[in-house]
Amino acid sequence: MSKQGTQAGQSGLSRRQFIGLTGGAVGAAIGSYALGQHFLGQPPTINKRKIESAEFTTDNQTTDVLVIGGGMAGLFAAVKAHDAGATVAMVSKGRLGSSGLTPFAKGIFCYDKHNSQISLDEFVEKVTESAIDTNNPVFTRQMAEHSYDRVQELKAWGFFDSPLYNQSFMRPIEERRIPLHERIMITHLVKQDGRVVGASGFSLDSPKIIHFHAKTVVLCTGSGGFKPNGFPVCDLTHDGSIMAYKIGAKITGKEWNDGHPGSAQNSGSSYDNWHGQIEEKPSTTGIEVHHDLGVDLNYQAYNLGAPVTMAPPGAQTDTELSGGPWIPDAFRHPDRRPPMPPPEPGLAALFGKGRPSGPPGMGGEQVGGSSAGMAIHKSEGLVPINETGLSTVAGLYAAGDALGSYMSGGIYTQIGSSLAGSAVQGAIAGEAAAKQSATLPHNPISAANQRYNTEQILAPLLRERGYSPAWVTQVLQGIMIPNFVLYIKKGRLLEAALAYIEELRDHHSPMLMAEDLHALRLAHETENMIITAEMKLKASIMRTESRCSHYRLDYPEVDKENWQAWINIEQGPDGEMLFEKQPFDMWPNFPANPVANG
């Protein structure tokens, strides 16, 4: 008998049942668990540590405003907080200007009110129409109104002169002598006496724990995904949102999905998909409101099978297909085409000959799931209580993709608005954080909180045996990324996926282990992804309608009677997830009365 047949027999399953169990996307995750833990009777992996906890040193840093994140939002938050009179420290898991999705954004929206054929009121109204009311018009207007000034500052720093952003980002930071801490993973925000007082994390290059004591904190940590292939989101794992959630901040927008496809050729290679855009210099974009990158292709693939090809945004395809995500009539123009990048000059054109250029998903056969786990830019993150990005935790601000501002709602509406929104929101949040810090005394992180955070940071390293972050992440991907779970949703399948995610939450997350600093980073990222997956499933179950980038086969219509509201999530006193509706035309109430879901 074959090894496969022997394993099937030992489990009490027929060979056909065994193959059926392990053959599908979700089945692969279940099967890998079964093979590793039950069929072969193997114990959890023993931790072969390459570094010991005793080797870690401790460092303390004190500042007025702590900016976490090294992308566009973080840059402007740090600069404007400094210019408002605060001492500022900037910390990033990556390199300044090379962090998160900022390096891959090459278009920045610039609204010039003196040379525009459309007024601000008209622009906001058109975005609201495309977003099917899901946008927050305060942030839509704010982005457009301040975009011109932010673009002028970027020009002065040399941002548009190179496809790489580090040098231009460093210019204002060095001029202001703002302390910059790179390759530091922040794992914990600290709340004392009802407000945030700093954050703790560890170095990715040396065994060192760092505690940042601050009067106010601005999260510019971006969004995240489930480490999918083919899209440059693999180093973003919703760290900021989950840290904030754990100290009481409300989180929103988890039911929405980013619909970026990837090329079917070399689909797992982010560089093959994106190099044409990475190598371009950034440029400005004008007004062109769209309704793009929802789950239209996912619906097509679900009903007709692969392969699928990318049509112009909002256009009808040649294939007869009824139903699916609803697109407002004004955005169904069949003659629209996505903007193509300018031709590559000189040597770039010579050596780039034959390779794809520009944004992925603009032609040819496509695959989905390339940005799995990420929502539409600016539609998920910390719930703001006002236009400055202040969260529901005192002293904690957010900007960019870390802020659930709903600047464009649950769908892409304006090319270049994401980068512009990050610049604008970062500047406003940084200045507001500086002004608030001027009114506050320093409240250092207590010794008890420092000890607790250190213990939590090092916990995966101290475990003698358990599960590797890479294996748990693979199981998570097998559960969440299938088209029929994450994108084309049904209640029963969402509930089924949730059962597996809750198993990862309750059993596997507490047993994540790390042998070195890289694995320690992965362990904390994997825990964040598990919590994010639970949020996405429960919010998707709760929203019993279809709108923009959220599509339910069992609730396929827009429901304006019951769902003119965003979904907010917060952690209850016993650690449970609590959910509430926030009407589209209201800021969140204090105190709120959320109800448990799932």
Image (cartoon, rainbow, N blue to C red):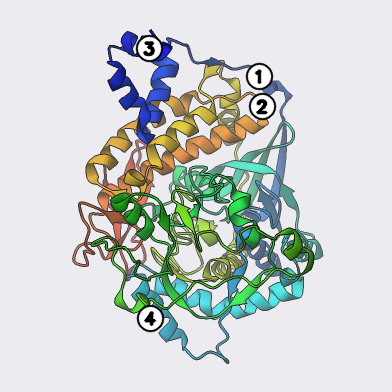
Disc nearer the start of the sequence (4/3): 3
| Camera-side mark, 4 or 3 | 3
Residue at horizontal 59 percent and vertical 49 percent from the top:
270
Q: Residues within 10 Å of mark 4 (few under 14, many from 20)?
A: some
| Camera-side mark, 3 or 2 | 3
Label 4 sits on a secondary structure element that is helix
Q: Which mark is residue 516?
A: 2
Q: Residues within 10 Å of mark 2 (few under 14, many from 20)?
A: some
* Cβ–Cβ under 8 Å for marks 3 and 2: no
Label 1 sits on a secondary structure element that is loop
User: What amino acid type is highlighted by mark number 2?
Assistant: Asp
Q: Is residue 160 left or right of residue 495?
A: right
Separation of marks 1 and 4 at Cα, in angstroms: 57 Å
Disc nearer the start of the sequence (1/4): 1
Label 2 sits on a secondary structure element that is loop
Residue at horizontal 36 percent and vertical 75 percent from the top:
331
Q: Which residue is mark 4?
A: 125
Disc nearer the start of the sequence (1/3): 3
Q: Is residue 352 left or right of residue 399?
A: right
Q: Is residue 73 visible?
A: yes
User: What amino acid type is highlighted by mark number 4?
Assistant: Glu
In this picture, is 60 found above or below 148? above
| Camera-side mark, 1 or 3 | 3
In this picture, is 337 found above or below 410? below
User: What amino acid type is highlighted by mark number 3?
Assistant: Gln
Q: Quadrant of residue 209?
A: top right
Q: Which mark is residue 7?
A: 3
Q: Which residue is mark 1?
A: 49
Q: Where's residue 13, x and y in %?
A: 28, 15
Question: Split into 4 quadrants, where in the image is the C terminus?
Answer: top left
Label 3 sits on a secondary structure element that is helix
